[in-house]
Every structure is written in C-alpha cells, then in structure tokens.
Amino acid sequence: MTRLPPCISPDAPRRRSVGRGPLLCIAAAATALLAACAGTPGVTEKGEVRVSAVSAADSIALPIGRTVRVDGLAALTLRDVPAESRCPVDVQCVHAGDASIELDVCPSGCATAVRVRLGLVMEPRSTIIDGVRIETMRLVPLPRAGALIRREDYIATVRVTRASR
C-alpha cells in the first residue's frame, strides 16, 4: 500500500485557509520571475533582438548578421570581421595580434545606418555616433592553430551607452 504524505492523507486535519507563508512564497517567486524577465531580450517582428539600454551598458552579444535594437539608443548589426590576426590560444606568440569588426549603427530615428570599423586591441576601440557610444569588448570564437573560423560563427560583444557630454 502506498503511503500518502500527511498533508494529503485522508486522516489529515483539514484547513479552511492557507497561511501567509505559502502566499508570501508565491508572491516572492512571482516578483523574482517578473524581475528576471524585465532584462530578457525580446524579438521584434523583423527578427531583431531588442534589449534595454541598461543591459546594453553592461554588454550585448552580436552574432554576425543579426540586428540588436537597444531601446532608445540605436540598432546595431555585426556585418563582418574583416581582419583577424589574433594569436591562436594554443600557440605561444610574440605579439597578441588583433581583430576588427564592422558594424552598421543606426541611432534611434535614423534613416540610414552608418558603417563603422572598430578594433579589439588597436584603436579605435570605440566610437560615438549621434550621442551613442559603442565600445568593443571581445570577439569569439578565439582562433586555434590550423583551424579556420567560419564567418557565421563570430559573435562580438560590445557596450552601448549614451555618450557623456
């Protein structure tokens, strides 16, 4: 015979009301869920990823060819990685090398995107367009000796903030 836990056994005393403990627990879980979802990117009808300016000030990942729209600031698209000379992670190099990325940047309300080229190590690593500062942070995957990186595998991480005056 299967034993039921005391809370659902037929002999358990019946309660008419639920104590405050379970309700507080449910309310706390709902609040945490809503807070977590507030920073979750959405997807627009055009397939663009939408993120908040707060999230973008920390960092955002840009897969190649995908547009990320930062609410109230700009839309960014990683177009290409035209230069890749970083030292492979499994090789000891005299020079670390560098990589550069090409972004299309369209500040809020613009009609035509501006194409910019930024480096990871060498300048320029950041730019300001119409009051929006874009700064490169990293590019993955990292090179490995003898392995080619496919263009579609690149993901650039950038920081997007309102430029201080």
Image: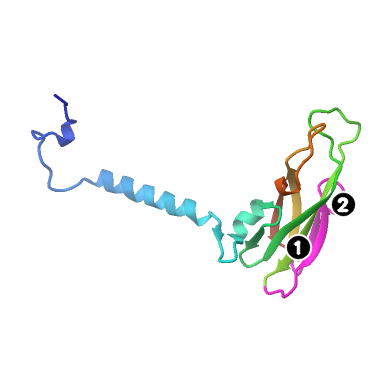
| Residue denoted by label 1 | 104
In the drawing, what numbered circle is on residue 74?
none
Q: Give the x, y percent position of residue 26.
A: 32, 48
> Quick one: label 2, few (<14), some, or many (20+) residues within 10 Å?
few
Report whether 10 appears left or right of 39: left
Q: Give the x, y percent position of residue 93.
A: 88, 30
Compared with 52, 130 (above or below) is below
Report the span colored magenta.
109-131
Residue sticking out furthest to the left = 11
- Is residue 67 in view from this perspective? yes
Look at the image and tell me in which quarter the C terminus lies.
Answer: bottom right
- Is residue 164 in view from this perspective? no
Residue sticking out furthest to the top = 1
> Tag 2 or tag 1, which sits nearer the N-term?
1
Under tag 1, what secondary structure?
Answer: strand
Quick one: 8 or 32, which is closer to the camera? 8
Quick one: 12 or 78, which is closer to the camera? 78
